[in-house]
Image (tube, rainbow, N blue to C red):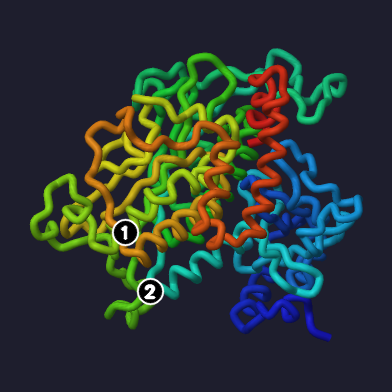
Amino acid sequence: MSSFAEQCGVHDSTRQSALAHTTRLIEASGIELVRFAWCDLHGVLRGKSLMASAAAKAMQNGVGMVSTLMLKDTSDRTAYKVFEAGGTSDLPGFEYASNLMLLADPGSFKPLPWATKTGWMQGQLRFLDGRPVELDTRHVLQLALQRLKQAGYGMKCGLEIELHVYRLDQDSPDQALDPEQAAWPGLPPRVSMIHPGYSLLNETWFDMSEEPLRIIRDTALALGLPLHSLEVEFGPSQVEAVFDATDALTAADNMVLFRNGVKQALRRAGFHATFMCRPPFPNIMSSGWHLHQSLFELNDAASNAPDHAPRRNAFMRDQPGAGTLPNDAQYTLSEIGEHYLAGLLAHARAMTVFCTPTVNGFGRFQPNALAPQSVLWGRDNRGAMLRVVGGSGDPATRIENRIGEPAANPYLYLASQIHAGLDGIQRRLKAPPATDAPYGSLDTRLPTSLNEALDALLADQVLVDAFGSAFVNYLVRVKRSEASRYEEAVDKIDFQRREYFSRI
């Protein structure tokens, strides 16, 4: 009898070898629990913990998971009426909180450095008949990368992530764990800052923050993540982590693993990390997630080289375009790079909800705040939405998207860039001149609320078709649930404190 992995069509000799290796590793290392994890719509890891003795079988036959996990908003309320007739009529396979199967990738196994004798594996959801669940966000990115590959390109991404780290208050009871105050969602923990802020890259502030920063460093490196630097950011208790560039799918996987691993490791040491854009305190600074991206060519002479050989950066040009000025796109970018840049601009309002998906994140789009406000690009301009970095002959030439908040689902963030950029390439769109006034008053503005961003997505037929109307309708329904509850909340700050601060 064939296994579920074989039924799904994913079990081959490479997977069989990885399964055997992981099984031996679990047995030899004394692992007692294995977490089978999956990334939900909001970028949060969920899953089941199995006894080590059950892991090998589960890698072959999957683990059952309730399908409503895919239908939750950020408070864990189910946005669909799954027990009413027709409640999931547009989502076949999700009726009555039925089961889905989580199939892990045995090659993704990692011992968790903060949890005793505990391993971890990444999985993706399948229907019981083996079909991939097309609403699964990692699958959404995989489909986008297939489109990109058909066009002759791969994608390379570097991550620049800001977050806030606080010390848990040890002198007063944790209200988040007080059963008398349990709520849905509950109160956040009481915290204090790890540094006072307002002194960018201050070495003394870094020294004050050394203990939690060391935990972040040790956790990231133990997980095999390509951490490049850790810095004290400008805001109170704010820090930044920068990662070397990798292929797009690896970058998205790394973001999920980093975000969830850092929160867990720091909590055990008495700290609280939040990837919420704007924590609910006075005088904070917003956190962003700046995504550095470039394409590399698959159909050039390098395509016959080994997989580890460098590919030519499709955005790089050898010298400025003939007749161009520094504010012209092709002064810095190749023709393909300009088309891709123009595609990002053309679909900027529609893709905002994939980059900034919470009601909290839109407070970041303010003038003179090192955050974008309008649909513009600039050469090495940190006030512009898109910052073009590099120059002639520079293999690191790239486009930095500054829309993102650190709470974004990385698979959707990256997929939105691919679909928008590909449209620019396919239609050979031209970019306007670079801005020298990113906070000018006459430019097209980014959405200022979650509902406005959702409306912008629905109005963009190119992105709706690229993601698929079924996925877009699903995303909009779940996010409307979040936005509606925010609009109905009497205390908007308390809503964000409960909804995001302790959960994201």
Above or below residue 158? Residue 442 is above
Could you tell me if residue 480 is visible in this image? Answer: yes
Helix, strand or loop at label 1? It is: loop
Camera-side mark, 2 or 1: 1
**CA gap, disc 2 to disc 1?**
18 Å
In depth, the one of 391 and 194 nearer the eye is 391
Between disc 2 and disc 1, whose residue precedes? 2
Residue furthest bottom as drawn: 1
User: Which amino acid, mark 2?
Assistant: Gly
Rendering coords of residue 383 (x, y %): 32, 33
Find residue 472 and report its image quarter: bottom right
- Residue displayed at 76% across by 55% down: 33
Rendered residue at 54%/48% (across/down): 457
The residue nearer to you, when weighing 224 against 297, is 297
Q: Is residue 243 above or below residue 150?
A: above
Q: Position of residue 13 (x, y in %)?
A: 62, 84
Where does residue 108 sit, x and y in percent of width and height?
A: 61, 63
Q: Position of residue 476 (x, y in %)?
A: 65, 47
Q: Residue at the spot x=75%, y=49% of the render?
A: 71
Q: Which of 265/238 is in front? A: 238
As shown in the figure, which amino acid type bears the numbered disc 1? Leu
Q: Report the residue marked by disc 1.
A: 429
Residue 7 sits above or below residue 497 on the image = below
* Residue behind mark 2: 152
Is residue 218 among the parts visible in the rendering?
no
